[in-house]
Image (cartoon, rainbow, N blue to C red):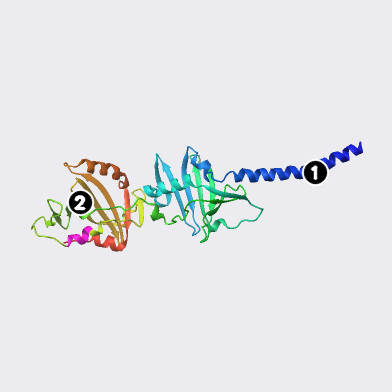
Amino acid sequence: MIKHIKIGLFLLLFTIPLMLFGIHLNNGRIHALSRGNYFFDITRNHPQISSINLKFADGNTISINRKEDLWFVKEADDYFVSFKKINTLVTLIRNTIIYRADALEKNALQFLEKDCIVIESIDNTGKVVEKAVIAPKKEKNKHHYALLNNDNFLYQISGNFDISSNVLDWLQMPILKINKKEIREIRSDKFYVYRRFDGENFLEKDTNKHTPHIDSFINQLWYLSAVDVKHSVNFKFDNYKKTSTFDIVLFNGIIYHLTFYSNENEYWLNVRLDRNKLMSEAGINILEENSMLFKGWYFKLPSDRGDIISNFSI
């Protein structure tokens, strides 16, 4: 009996290391097979991702939330995310590939989370679907090192994760991108200039005199971007006074109503889109696509440009 027990113990002691070694090889094989798989596999196949949180080494956080197929930036009063920017981010998440996966020994991390970009995908119940910690790519490295969901593996992944931590870079900008050749009339409480055709000089309404210095005003409307955004619900009207209004009438029939508010060297702009009776089909499409970007929103301008536009007169 004792002899049989000894034989059994010997076989057990012999087989346990083999079993553990087999488990180790199998785990290695499983993650070796992950090469070429998608890194954010759960996220890309999840039907109800409602938020993407980005946390940066400089301490900034950008929270991007989806509502009815549109994306908004929480840190900018829930203003619209740049269409180009969100498409780039979604494409990056969907197409990032695992190059290699290695098992991590305990306490053997090669980088700290505080030095990395952290990307979290959140579902519509508020649950974190995936959390990735991605280290900056070193000069001689072809791939980023990354951790995923605390699964004790160190990944090397494809993709460019040099992502901006500046909230302004994520907003749908510019506010205005009005070219001189598009403008037919400019009206304000200080002046009124017009022309009949593109290519003609702008004339003052009352005197029909040529007004060449209107170009300096028009140049300020090209690629005008904001340094902050507030919805009307959170805009403190009592802190500002209305300084000026302008109507920019385009040849396609769109009218931009610009209203400026100021407080010392701080300038805010509200834009309202309108149309005249003779409006082109292209103008109607632009109006429909862009109205939501302005309705109820107030944009803080750089002080120098805000001063030039708001106080312009001929």
Image quadrant containing the N terminus: top right
The disc, 2 or 1, on the residue closer to the chain's N-terminal end is 1
Query: Does 214 appear in magenta?
Result: yes
152 lies left or right of 295? right
Residue depicted at 18% across the width and 60% down the height: 214
294 lies left or right of 14? left
Q: Nearer the viewer, residue 235 or 270?
A: 270
Q: Which mark is residue 182?
A: 2
Write down the residue under mark 1: 14
Residue 111, image quadrant: bottom right
Residue 130 appears in the rendering: yes
Task: State the CA–CA distance, disc 2 to disc 1.
Answer: 85 Å
| 174 w.r.t. 264: above or below | above
Instruction: Identify the amino acid type marked 1.
Output: Phe
Q: Main secondary structure of the magenta part?
A: helix
Eye-nearest disc, 2 or 1? 1
Q: Element under label 1? A: helix
Image quadrant containing the C terminus: bottom left
Residue depicted at 47% across the width and 45% down the height: 95
The residue stretch that appears in magenta? 213-218
Query: Does 208 appear in magenta?
Result: no
- Circle 2 residues within 10 Å: few <14, some 14–19, many ≥20: some
Instruction: Identify the amino acid type marked 2.
Output: Glu
